[in-house]
Amino acid sequence: MIDLYRVLPEEMDILVTGLGQPRYRAEQLLQALYHESPKKMSDLHQVPSSMRDALVKAGYTIGSENEVHRVVSEDGHTTKILLKFDEKTLIETVLMQYSPSQDKTHPRSTVCVSTQVGCPMGCVFCATGQMGFEKNLKAEEIVSQVLHFAHILSQRGEHITNLVFMGMGEPLANYDETIRAVRLLTHPRAFGLGQRSITISTVGIIPGIDHLADEDLQVKLAISLHAPNDELRKKLVPTAGPHSVEDLIAAAKRYFKKTGRRVTFEYALIDGINDSTKVASELAYILKGNGAHVNLIPMNPTAGGFQRPDRKRVLAFQQVLRNGDVNCTVRVEKGAEISAACGQLRTDIMKKIR
Ligand code: SAH
Ligand code: SF4
């Protein structure tokens, strides 16, 4: 069975004409899929039933997700949803909303999507990394996470403004399905989100970064660095292996040169591990002069026993980078109390539900 939610518009044209239908049927299908939230083939009443039958006969389907759990933060700004695609595919997706700026009436609504169930990279401070790797998500499963929230928001007269690939899993370790999902979500004939509103975050898979630079996509890239030297980085990202800090910075420069878009370095600050001012100076030294932007993420506690530094240490770290002429911000955390912040997407609840 092939899910219609993985079919790119160009492929839809071929599919539809191959079934002996006029091309405009492809437009009708895409319009229905991306703007009407059909849950099954028979919901596609925009096209004749003979065509729906022909699609089914040709092996097409609409696999729909089920929402099995929802948690909303006390301030109402963060919503975490557990989606079930099949017995083995339960994933978490998060919506983070920020108050509208004065000139806008709608809040900024960022959806954080997962690309894998679990993650093979095993970062020691990350809840997903600690659960191990279960499977790669398919493009349609990534797309459905976004459409699920799009539907919820549309009922409130709101819409998704940004998308970050910062949920469970390493997007560049599931490269083809991630890129297919990005194409579907940004294609003007499909979901139509602006490419520049999308950020892909990677632990630093260098061939993937170079490959991404060669795509005709305007997405933003964030590299999770976490340390200024290999010794420390390998303690935090055990699978960093062949990719040295130096190689990562060189890859970020190549990405910038090729695409004209600067890379953000994410840095999870862990108390007593990578948050001293000495480490900050080393980081400032290696990043100086390449226009890098560092986003500090005071770590969210997970089962690993690591803690977040206090505010004073975070600000001191930031100051050293700024003094070293490195652009540096501290991420505003959302949803920590509902375990929906970075690295907290855990599957405990999935086990209960199973
Ligand atoms: N695998 C990708 C994207 C998903 S993780 C990556 O590693 O970049 C998204 C971000 O959350 C990464 O920057 C990651 O380092 C960060 N993160 C993971 N665990 C965290 C934790 N416990 N506290 C804060 N940030 C965390
Ligand atoms: Fe995977 Fe990213 Fe977590 Fe590392 S931080 S284990 S790469 S999801």
Image: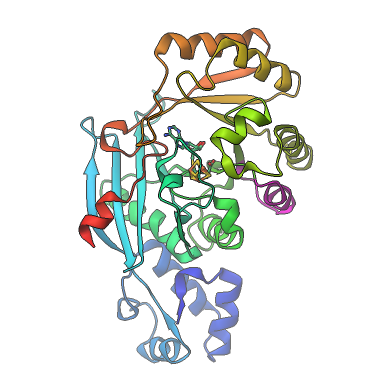
Residue 264 lies, in percent from the top left, at: 61, 31
- In which quadrant of the rendered view does residue 1 lie? bottom left
Task: Check the image and report above or below for 23 versus 245.
Answer: below
Work out whether residue 224 can be spotted. no
Residue 88 highlighted magenta (yes or no) = no
- In which quadrant of the rendered view does residue 196 lie? top right
Which color scheme did the rendering employ for the protein?
rainbow
Work out whether residue 160 can be spotted. yes
- In which quadrant of the rendered view does residue 188 lie? bottom right
Residue sitting nearer the eye, 300 or 293: 300
The span picked out in magenta is: 205-220
Residue 120 lies, in percent from the top left, at: 52, 52
Task: Check the image and report above or below for 113 versus 248.
Answer: below
Residue at the (60%, 9%) spot, across then down = 320
What is the total number of numbered labels drawn onto the structure image? 0
Residue 127 lies, in percent from the top left, at: 40, 42
Q: Is residue 53 left or right of residue 297?
A: left
